[in-house]
Image: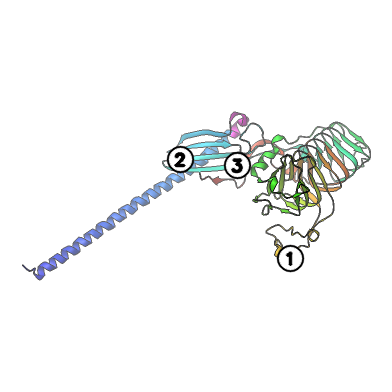
Amino acid sequence: MRSTPRCRRRATAYFVVLVSASMVTMVGLSALVAHRVQLRISEQESGLAEARFYARSAIEMGLLWIEDDPDWRDNRSSGVWVADVPIGEGSFSLEGIDPSDKDLADSASDLLVLIGTGAKGTARYKLQVTLVPQGQSLTCLETALHAGNDLLLDGTVVECDQTISANNNVVATNANVNADVEAANTVSGQYYNQGMADGASGVVARTMPDVAVFSSYVADGTPINIVSIPTSGGVPTISGELISPLCNPYGATNELGIYVIDCATQKLIITDSRIVGTLVLANPGSGSEVRGSVTWEPAVANYPALLVDGSMRVSFDKTPLSEGSLGVNFNPPGTPFEGAENGDRMDTYPSQIKGLVYVSGDAETLNSCTFDGVVVVGVTMTTTNELSLTYDQTFLNDPPPGFGEASTMALSPGSWRQVVD
């Protein structure tokens, strides 16, 4: 039987209604799914925000524990301090890490990294901050040159606008000393031209860095492998080079300009170079030396220029560092004449070390060395020929890590960051 037009119209209408209903249902289901997804995202964002708050709370708790406990370094170890402590609708955990040697108790000069982890449901957030020791400056920074044992002035001419000192004896032999002189024991010899005729004896010994002074620089520094340094006569020699935060001819760069060389008891020579940064020399071999022409300053204003864990000889002279003579462009990256393509190799730089120099063992200066800053020698300092010293109180007013008697821990600016496992 054939369908009538009326039946066909009814079937068509029914089909339209059915399709419309299905579309309405689908739209409704899509909206419901979208709502649920949005709700889940909102819940996750809310959970993450709370987890972040709990992580920050963990660090704040750690700061409070440090402030309330003068012996916190002895009472806490490097590692997990607390785990899964309930807070609000979640929990927090806290780690306190010594990044240098994992031993909080061995030195008050060591940095501390606090890592807080907050959790709520499946949301986790990890936050860390670095704390640096702060306190009164070591008194060795009050003079332009200080020796932890003896200061031997042997046939030298010393020009200095500030006191030079020693924690034992100062002995001048055929010297011409144009500086105030003091010693915890005695000042002897002849030709002291300023202050008391024989200098000031019997003064209070000055405080010195401890064995951990190198730790924070090693932790923050970029290693330079001694085998990557070319040799001259079989001796690793840094010559005709520019070293700076953006330039390291031997490997990766370091934004603070801190580079660490383990000499492995090999002799190392540094000559005819420009250094804008902090070099840390560990285990230098006998005869290791800075010589020729050098222009040297730290990249961070109050940081050391040179740290030597061992003994060192310094015999650079007043001859300016010349780009033209050496055929080297010493302009650091980021300056108008950084590239050799500019053809700018006509600059000269005064041969001097600006900043703080610390040698933990013995040190010897020869030729006509010029320092602008502070020189501290752990044991005996011997100087011959000419030595020019201009004192800079930057390091006394704002001591770098390892050169202050730590009494408090302070947040390192810019060190807050999220940690992603």
Residue bounds of the magenta highlight: 66-77
Single out the mark in the foreground, 2 or 1: 1
Residue 367 image point, x, y percent: 87, 47
- The residue to which callout 3 is attached is 130
Q: Are the residues at dot 1 and dot 3 in contact (C-beta closer than 8 Å)?
A: no
Q: Does 73 appear in magenta?
A: yes
The secondary structure type at the circle numbered 2 is: strand
Kind of residue sitting beneath label 1: Gly
Q: Alpha-carbon distance for marks 1 and 3?
A: 43 Å
Viewport quadrant of the N terminus: bottom left
Label located before the other in sequence (2 or 1): 2
Q: Nearer the viewer, residue 189 or 234?
A: 234
Kindly identify which numbered label has been placed on residue 343. Answer: 1
Classify 201 as above or below 14. above
Q: Can the viewer see residue 190 in this picture? A: yes
Q: In which quarter of the image is residue 145?
A: top right
Q: Residues within 10 Å of mark 3 (few under 14, many from 20)?
A: many
Task: Classify residue 349 by image quadrant.
Answer: bottom right
Q: Name the residue under label 2.
A: 119
Q: Residue 7 at what x, y percent from top left?
A: 10, 67
Q: Distance between the residues labelled 2 and 1?
A: 58 Å
> How many residues crowd around disc 2 within 10 Å: few (fewer than 14), some, or many (20 or more)?
many
Q: Tell which of 73 and 350 is nearer to you.
A: 350
